Image: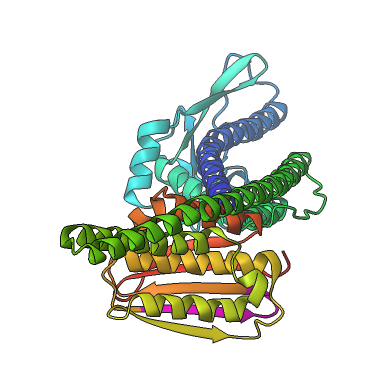
Amino acid sequence: MRLVLQLVARLLVVVMLCLAAATVWATIEAYRSVDRATEASAERVSQALQGLYWHELLLHGSRMREHLLPVPEWRTIETMKLISPGVCVRFEPAGAFEKPLCGQDKGLGTTPPAWFASAVQTLLGSHAAVAKPISARATTFGTVSATPDPDAAIRLAWQHILDNIGVALLMAAAIAILASLAIAHTLAPAQSIVAALKRMADGRYRTFLPRFRSMELAMIGQAVGDLGDRLAQAMEERATLTRRLIEIRDDERRTLARELHDEFGQNLTAILAFANAIEATGADAKDGAVAQDARMISKAALTIMACLRGTLNRLRNPLAEELGLEASLINLVDNWRSQHETRPSIQLDLKGDLADIGGTVAATAYRVAQECLTNALRHTTAREILLRIERRSYPENALLIRVEDDGGGDAISIARASGFGLTGIRERLAALGGSLSIARATRGLSVDATIPLAA
């Protein structure tokens, strides 16, 4: 999962937890507000009744203090206004058949779900009644007792939740959206860093990254840039070293070719001359056994000379440096066809203008084609081999070499092989900034090499 989505998901979890906590707090606060309303109702009614008693005492001032006055008429509309909705008030001592005076609870919230009512009563408990004494001239005339209606209290808590949950949800959604946008904006530079790393993986090590406002991302961007510079420098040094090693190896190949030609070639020529002389002498002397042995020596010498000639052709400078890439490839294919008349069929496909390709690029392309053809002819049972050389212009500006055969084979094991042939062409391609890939073809293997022409 993307980092932005993870952070947004965690933010939503935090917002939901906060919303749940706010809902619980609002429920408790609404439920407990009934207790405050009950106490306030009891206080207001007791103050009102106490005022009525004082009024009666002032009107009947001749009465003895110890004589209680009759209960004044208190069940009036004015008293009803003092009682909060959902609260019932009773005067003690109560008169005969006297009912509590209750505040209007019609429209006081909606009926809550059964689970809510059960949970509130279980967790928060029931409400306590509130009693307030009524005193005048140091005499207590009675007590005002206020009792909340449990059902009204639960309805009030549920209505309070309904009134505030919409606003809370809107606030939570706004916080989540704004915070998500802020997180996405803050982490947007990470995409540039990932893109730079992908370019480095493709071989474009030196990459530009803008300056980031975040200190942490700026440090990461700086580290990525420094890493790219070091990798580019290391690859340049490696390419330089590889080119130098190839030059040394080519010098050694030329020296070895010269020594083989001078030493082995002369000795084989001498052996062949001696064998011919012995054969002639044996024929004159009518010694058939000696002549037969001399002919065998001549045949072996000719075979060795043919092998030596092929080895010298491989050791000497490729014809691409002398004839050009196109002519050298045609000559290479013709030589293979002449040496392998029965199998397989070799097709040469040239695309693009190859006339101006020379130097190291041409030599490397020739070596790659030569090595791939050699492997296909020696190590497979291919019947058809396709050698394709294609020059691609902008934006690739590269030379593509493909050798495809129908001889089967395991592409993975061959790609992991550490033979001198594949290792050598990999080194040559790496020195020019190219690449080599081995993949499964329709009926065999396909070897693809790419050489940048700007190298």
* Residue 396 in magenta stretch: yes
Residue 48 appears at what percent x and percent y? 65, 35
Q: Nearer the viewer, residue 134 or 449?
A: 449
Judge whether 138 appears above or below 430 on screen. Answer: above
Q: On the image, which quarter does residue 65 sit in?
A: top right
Residue 93 visible in the snapshot: yes
Q: Residue 243: image x %, image y %?
A: 67, 51
- Residue 327's spot in the image, x, y percent? 59, 81
Q: Is residue 334 above or below residue 449?
A: below
Q: Is residue 207 left or right of residue 76?
A: right
Left or right of residue 419, residue 89 in this image: right
Above or below, 149 against 186 in this view is above
- Structure colour scheme: rainbow
Front residue of 40 and 35: 35
Residue sitting at x 66%, y 59%: 432
Residue 137 at x, y percent in the picture: 68, 16
Q: Residue furthest front?
A: 285
Magenta stretch secondary structure, dominant: strand
> Is residue 290 found left or right of 56 in the rendered image?
left
Give whichever of 332, 75 is nearer the camera: 332
Query: Which is nearer the eye, 19 or 145?
Result: 19
Image quarter hosting the C terminus? bottom right
> Is 363 covered by the magenta stretch?
no
Instruction: Tell me where the magenta segment starts and ends, as one range.
Output: 385-398
Q: How many marks?
A: 0
In percent of the image, x 38 and y 57: which residue is there? 274
Res. 303 in view: no
Picture quarter containing residue 316?
A: bottom right
The relative height of residue 178 versus residue 17 in the rendered view (above or below) is below
